Amino acid sequence: MSNSLMPPSTDAYNHFISTPLDALLTEHQAVNPEDKALALFRRCVAEVPAYRQFLESQKVNPAEVNSYQDFQKLPLMTKANYMQAYPLPERCLGGSLRGADRVAVSSGSTGQPTFWPRSADYELAVAQRFEQIFHDSFHAHECSTLAVVCFALGNWVGGLYTTSCCWHLARKGYPLMVATPGNNKAEIFRVVRELAPHFEQTVLLGYPPFVKDVIDAGAAEGIHWPSFNPRLVFAGEVFSEEWRSLVGQRIGSGAPCFDSASLYGTADGGVLGNETPLSIAIRRWLAGHPDAARTLFGESRLPTLVQYDPARRFFEVHEGTLVFSAENSVPLVRYHIADKGGILDFDELWGFLQAQGVRSFNELGLDEDFQPRHLPFVYVFGRADFTVSYYGANIYPENVTVGLEQPEIMNWVTGKFVLETAETEAGDSYLHIAVELLPDVEPDETMVPVIAESIRAQLLRLNSEFAHYTPQERQLPQITLHTFASPDYFPAGVKHRYTRRQ
């Protein structure tokens, strides 16, 4: 395989199509990721006008960057200091959009939407993450598979990117048909009813809350999901293992580590990592051992835990947040995405589990003869500022989510809520949680104490700060119930925020 950063399109595509996943990953393991990151830097200096200007503005002489230690001192790219500071063509290889043949748009959740051009070459790195899931988890190379893309279609990154990567797998020889109803539930149900009976398994790919909504609404309309051997691919949100178990039960899943997988992706860099059977098994073990999880991650909430290929996406950690470098039409060198998280070497994480008493894969719920891929791990909490402080304890939305995801409660609620602190007329602080009900559920005050007790129990179990800092008489949250899409807390068509600060 060529050592150049961007081999010719035909060669790159043919290599991907003709090379089994095992061989591709073996090739990548022979690459020194630090050397590759340094080579990417040098190419950007030579071929990206904006990057040269950026270094000059930061008073960096590229000729003095000759080692990985020097690379680690390079300034961090951000949307503000780089993407919004230089014209789009100047941020591209060659200073032109000519090398890109497609474009995605970021959601704009932190400001103005950003355009991300790319070429098919760079899509292949992301297609390998999909291949890992379809091959290792779903065994889609061995059975006919219907892939139903439930992400929104259009310029937003999820739908078309996913579709294109699945098409690459079909072209590679996977017995895979890709259907693209997007986030239209009626179309999804029509696809499933007409096509799923002709395939050995059906994969739904979408945002976690929407996929759950599809499953629940489909069941209400008479779709018997277990008969279609469903598999699930998620992206976009952190969810709990209780939620995974709940959704798995509704589709008849008997193997939670193999029947679903989440992608860690961004419009900026595509898919950066993916859940594997091993990462899911570890996360499920940690969900049942919150003290060990706190020791490992340093927080009272469980992050998304995925494995990644450092030859494709090179991660670093800066002050508890993630930085990555990646080849693309707009190359990224030490790009700061502001996601709170960290990285763990394979042996480092396995050593931690052994120190906690885990002696075998079987103790994690996997077969004794399970063969993992020895790839490093990245864990992601999401944006660092979505917390509420209550009696000095940081309350995370993820803690509340687990309380709402108990089986009896999920028959009432959508899973959306707003967490905030408030004060009584006497000046006493209390924790208020506004909860959204399912479309066909009316508010019933008998639900309130059940929801409040469930959330308190999970806060006490998962959040040691809450348990130790909050007076016992202030631990029970005040719950208000709101009809579906209530404009005060859950307006339709607006990106939902799970916290609100006074």
Image (cartoon, rainbow, N blue to C red):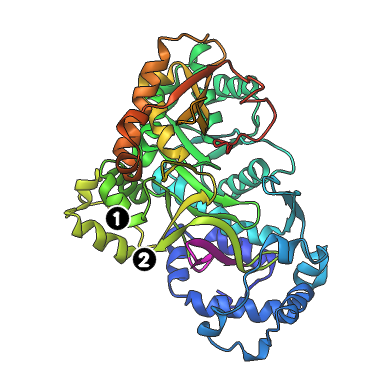
The residue beneath circle 2 is 345
Asked whether residue 433 is in view, the answer is: yes
Q: Identify which residue is drawn at 32% across, 56% down.
A: 296
Q: Identify which residue is drawn at 40% across, 19% down.
A: 409
Q: Is residue 324 magenta?
A: yes
Give the x, y percent position of residue 287: 31, 42
Asked whether the residues under the numbered discs 1 and 2 touch, taking CB atoms below 8 Å apart as contact, a structural biologist would say no
Assign the C terminus to one quadrant of the image.
top right
The residue beneath circle 1 is 295
Instruction: Mark 1 vs mark 2: give the one in front.
Output: 1
Q: Range of the magenta residues? A: 310-326
Element carrying mark 1: helix
Amino acid at circle 2: Asp
Amino acid at circle 1: Thr
Dividing the picture into quarters, in which one does residue 355 lie? bottom left
Left or right of 289 in this view: 230 = right
Give the x, y percent position of residue 218: 52, 18
Give the x, y percent position of residue 126: 57, 55
